[in-house]
Image (cartoon, coloured by chain):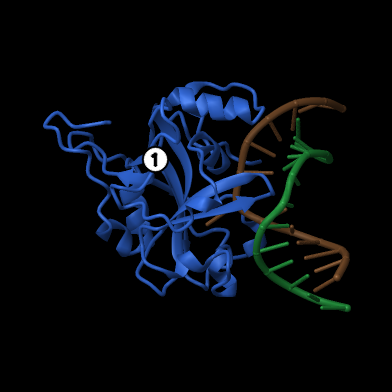
Chain colours: A blue, B brown, C green
Amino acid sequence: VSRLDDGRPPPVLDRKLLAGGSLDAARALLGARLVRDPERPGDTRRTGRIVEVEAYIGQDDRASHARMGPTARNRVMFGPPGIAYVYLVYGMHHCLNVVTEPAPRPAALLVRAVEPLAGLEAMRAARAAAGRAPVADARLAAGPGLVGAAFGIGREHTGIDLCDAASPLRLEAAPEDEPVPEAVATPRVGIAYAGEPWTSVPWRLLVPGSPSLSRQPR
DNA sequence: GCAAAGATTTGCT
DNA sequence: GCAAATCTTTGCC
């Protein structure tokens, strides 16, 4: 069990940081830790530093899954902040979102890239089990589908409270002595279907220089 | 009830 | 650089 020097467990991310504007929440999420408890005895805890997120804000956002109103798939986006929303894309990749803003306003942050910090063996094992070729450590979670694979995330995690220290999948604050990372904003990726202005709004936030950023599609 | 496209990744041409 | 893999959700008949 990971502990600080004084014996206290690491603090989960403050839900208030996710309850305000989604772009502020996105900045707060950069640098925070994604934590996955062991699934089985003998398995290792997986942790990583979030370095890239994308915001999907409101029902007006034509790129958001919330654009058609509440459905069986997206309903947690209309709920309280700090909850996980996991969806399957292209029939094969599970993508993790963190719900933001107070209910009933639908908004979420897609976790696009994470720098692996611990439990890299488990991440590599998950990759091997999926039949994928090995990659450099920094690239194990360098994309939204790769985050899901590296951390063993599935749709069964939808609805989990990521701000609860008891959750097997959760968010923790960065160490206090760690500098707040720089944040760069760019347009979102893979949403050409949404049209303007949604394809151009700079709602993708990333930590420049990280070796774990997602690959830029052509 | 069926067809189409998707908040992606990978491997081959 | 481009197309395949793979299946859920949505849109329209």
User: Which residue, as the protein is rendered here, is positioned at the far front?
Assistant: A41
Residue closer to the observer: A53 or A122:
A122
SS assignment at label 1: strand
Which residue is depicted at the point 54% across and 68% down?
A: A66
Q: Is residue A205 visible?
A: yes
Q: Is residue A77 above or below residue A204?
A: below
The amino acid type found where label 1 is placed reads Ile
**Which residue shows up at 58% across the image and 39% down it?**
A216
A183 lies left or right of A200: left
The residue shown at (16%, 37%) is: A8
Q: Quadrant of residue A143?
A: top right
Structural crowding at the residue carrying mark 1, measured as other residues with C-alpha within 10 Å and reported as few (<14), some (14–19) or many (≥20)? many
- Total marks shown come to 1
**Residue tagged by mark 1?**
A50
Q: Position of residue A152 (x, y in %)?
A: 51, 38
Q: Quadrant of the C terminus of chain A?
A: top right
Residue at the (64%, 23%) spot, across then down: A133
Q: Nearer the viewer, residue C9 or A38?
A: A38
Disc 1 chain ID: A
Question: Is A17 left, or right, of A86 in this rendering?
Answer: left
Give percent across and percent down for residue B2.
Answer: 88, 66
**Quarter holding the N terminus of chain A?**
top left
Q: Does residue A197 appear in the picture of this structure?
A: no
As drawn, the residue found furthest toward the left would be A6
| Image spot of residue A102 (x, y percent) | 35, 70
The picture places residue A180, in percent across and down from the top left corner, at: 26, 40
